[in-house]
Image (cartoon, helix red, strand yellow):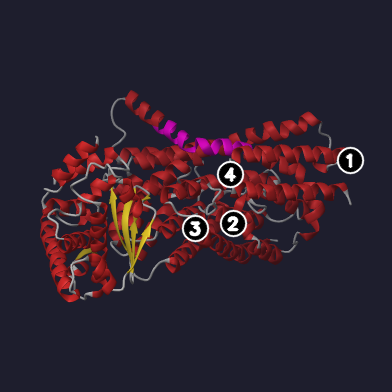
């Protein structure tokens, strides 16, 4: 797979439906087997709506749609860290409460100057998308009753005690659509998962690409 | 100055050099072979000036045979066979999907609660490593457990530490490791041959629980109060789904040995067959089943291959330590405590000397100290002294950066040794101290 093919893949990924990206997010969730597909679809819709509505509220509240200005107004500590791959995961960013956002430069730098994505997306846009996503995680901690932190499933029930759990996938979906809204882009930022992974393992990225198209 | 004292000082200095060597991450197999040679030559030089009691009546060839032939041969006979069958069983648990299924079920039990799920994962890991052994199975489990912990927002240093710590806890109850340390001990005190896993089981399980609790407390203290969120891309994972009846396989070898007094190798074989039958993997013609067993044994052997060379050179070092003991006795003999309470306190305080294959680590320089201690207090009961040495070997060693799978973990998780050691060294020490005191409470009266 060369850069030309990567560009073709990117163009196809930019057309993938939101529901498919939602199912992709669920496929990475540790509790993916505990939720029925029908319920997943309803949850995906609500998480997307939650992300977009939070974005509308945030843009109005902070008077800007620029993620850098928004981060400044929220007094977030945004740092760039020169690392990326941990275990089999390529890490793009990390939000550590209460206010620390780390953006990993390695996967972005790996994209290189001749990545095949020229004309489609720039490094600056990628950073803005990532920052927007992390701002949503900050807001999740701040906004009481937010859907992505309040939708719970029952894992087990013992003598009347119910062990309930939130779903990380919903937080990630919310973050993606929050970021998409404030950055005013047409595609899902989930596409970055595959495009940035490509430079670490083209074969695995290709598998992920096929997997997303299968949802 | 007495020649024995001079040689003893040179040996101690060479050991400090070995610590530096370990910290540098250089090859341990070669390092221990060089140390075995150096100590043997030093002991022969010393013997030419002043007779070495351990070499009495032995020719130079006898001494060399003892170090370079009898050492590895003894290890192969009593330890390596267990390691090979343990590795075979570990491969069965991995290939049948039993280990992965148990981990997935545990995660589904805990859910998106990092501390709770991490605790459950650590308990499951510890139980799994009561039977499994070798770097291969560790990696097979690590590539399942560590990404889960990371996806839960657990920081990489804490994830790696808690995983390695829970393996260490499981090793306290591991039969193969018990046999390894028992064989080393019996090399200096024949009475230890009668000391069985069943005799050790009670203190082993107590230490395992103590170790798990301490590891989890340290891991929880090291974690952020609120959950962090990572945006990360990961490849898809296949979902193994081994039937519930097969899950018992992970502790079957221990049950076989403890409840039915089965020989451990038979225990591993029966448990492996049970695992294969209950997961439906043992099917096809006789030839196909034979091929399956051959493949599992081959893969298991490959898993432990890097460890075998190291263990064989370590066995040379262990036997060389027998000849080094008189020189250590000349320096340290007067310092060895002779009462149970003082021994327990000394081991508790000096537990960190088990790190870096140090002088309280039986899988390191500890064999020389074992020889000194046994020569000074020959009547020390095995049931008391063996657990002390086992504790100062297991707790530091399996958290140590010289442990093969810990070294692998640094590359996999990109955790710095500094971040890891800030948690591992205090933890090893605390566990060692608590367990040594418990050994005194339980077995101090025997002395």
Q: Is residue B333 magenta?
A: no
The residue to which callout 3 is attached is: B420
Magenta part of the protein: which range?
B296-313
Helix, strand or loop at label 1? It is: helix
Contact check, label 1 and label 3, Cβ < 8 Å: no
Mark 4: few/some/many CA within 10 Å (<14, 14-19, 20+): some
Q: Earlier in the sequence, mark 2 or mark 4?
A: 4
Question: Closer to the camera, B312 or B204?
Answer: B312
Labels 3 and 2 positioned on one and the same chain:
yes
Identify the subunit bearing mark 1: B
Q: Is residue B300 magenta?
A: yes
The residue to which callout 1 is attached is: B49
The residue to which callout 2 is attached is: B391
Helix, strand or loop at label 2? It is: helix
Distance of label 2 from label 1 (alpha carbons): 37 Å
Labels 1 and 4 positioned on one and the same chain:
yes
Q: Earlier in the sequence, mark 3 or mark 2?
A: 2
Classified by dominant secondary structure, the portion drawn in magenta counts as helix
Is B437 on the left-hand or right-hand side of B331?
Answer: left
The residue to which callout 4 is attached is: B180
């Amino acid at each position: 797979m060369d850069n030309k093919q990567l560009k073709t893949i990117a163009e196809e990924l930019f057309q993938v439906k939101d529901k498919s990206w939602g199912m992709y997010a669920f496929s990475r969730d540790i509790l993916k087997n505990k939720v029925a597909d029908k319920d997943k679809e309803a949850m995906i819709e609500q998480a997307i709506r939650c992300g977009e509505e939070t974005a509308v509220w945030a843009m109005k509240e902070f008077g800007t749609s620029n993620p850098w200005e928004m981060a400044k107004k929220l007094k977030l500590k945004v740092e760039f860290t020169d690392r990326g791959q941990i275990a089999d995961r390529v890490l793009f960013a990390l939000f550590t409460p209460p206010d620390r956002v780390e953006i990993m430069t390695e996967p972005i730098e790996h994209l290189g100057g001749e990545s095949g994505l020229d004309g489609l997306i720039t490094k600056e846009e990628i950073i803005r998308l990532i920052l927007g996503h992390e701002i949503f995680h900050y807001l999740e901690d701040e906004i009481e009753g937010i859907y992505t932190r309040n939708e719970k499933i029952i894992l087990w029930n013992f003598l009347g005690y119910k062990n309930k759990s939130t779903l990380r996938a919903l937080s990630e979906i919310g973050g993606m659509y929050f970021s998409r809204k404030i950055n005013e882009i047409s595609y899902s930022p989930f596409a970055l998962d595959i495009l940035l992974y490509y430079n670490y393992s083209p074969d695995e990225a290709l598998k992920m690409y096929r997997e997303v198209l299968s949802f | 100055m007495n020649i024995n004292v001079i040689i003893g000082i040179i040996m101690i200095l060479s050991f400090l050099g070995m610590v530096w060597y370990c910290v540098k991450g250089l090859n341990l197999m070669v390092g221990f072979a060089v140390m075995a040679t150096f100590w043997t030559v030093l002991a022969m030089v010393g013997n030419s000036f002043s007779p070495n009691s351990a070499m009495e009546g032995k020719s130079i060839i006898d001494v060399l045979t003892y170090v370079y032939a009898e050492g590895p041969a003894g290890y192969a006979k009593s330890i390596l066979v267990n390691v090979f069958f343990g590795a075979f069983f570990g491969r069965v648990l991995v290939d049948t999907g039993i280990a992965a299924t148990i981990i997935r079920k545990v995660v589904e039990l805990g859910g998106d609660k990092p501390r709770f799920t991490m605790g459950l994962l650590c308990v499951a890991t510890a139980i799994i490593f009561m039977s499994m052994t070798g770097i291969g199975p560790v990696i097979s489990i690590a590539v399942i457990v560590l990404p889960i912990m990371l996806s839960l927002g657990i920081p990489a240093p804490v994830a790696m530490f808690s995983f390695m710590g829970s393996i260490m806890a499981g090793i306290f109850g591991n039969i193969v490791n018990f046999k390894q340390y028992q064989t080393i001990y019996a090399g200096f005190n024949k009475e230890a041959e009668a000391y069985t896993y069943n005799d050790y089981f009670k203190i082993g399980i107590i230490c395992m629980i103590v170790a798990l609790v301490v590891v989890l407390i340290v891991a929880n203290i090291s974690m952020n109060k609120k959950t962090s969120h990572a945006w990360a891309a990961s490849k898809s994972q296949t979902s193994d789904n081994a039937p519930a009846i097969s899950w018992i396989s992970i502790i079957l070898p221990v049950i076989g040995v403890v409840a039915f007094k089965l020989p451990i190798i038979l225990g591993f074989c029966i448990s492996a067959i049970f695992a294969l039958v209950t997961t439906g993997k043992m099917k096809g013609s006789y030839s196909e089943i034979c091929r399956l067993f051959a493949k599992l044994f081959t893969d298991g052997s490959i898993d432990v291959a890097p460890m075998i060379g190291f263990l064989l050179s370590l066995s040379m070092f262990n036997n060389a330590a027998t000849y080094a003991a008189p020189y250590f006795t000349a320096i340290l003999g007067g310092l060895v405590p002779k009462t149970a309470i003082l021994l327990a306190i000394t081991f508790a305080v000096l537990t960190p000397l088990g790190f870096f294959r140090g002088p309280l680590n039986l899988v390191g320089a500890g064999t020389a100290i074992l020889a000194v201690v046994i020569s000074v207090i020959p009547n020390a009961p095995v049931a008391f002294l063996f657990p002390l040495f086992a504790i100062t070997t297991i707790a530091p060693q399996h958290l140590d950066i010289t442990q093969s799978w810990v070294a692998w973990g640094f590359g996999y998780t990109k955790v710095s040794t500094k971040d890891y050691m800030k948690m591992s060294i205090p933890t090893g020490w605390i566990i060692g101290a608590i367990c040594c005191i418990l050994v005194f409470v339980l077995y101090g009266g025997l002395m």
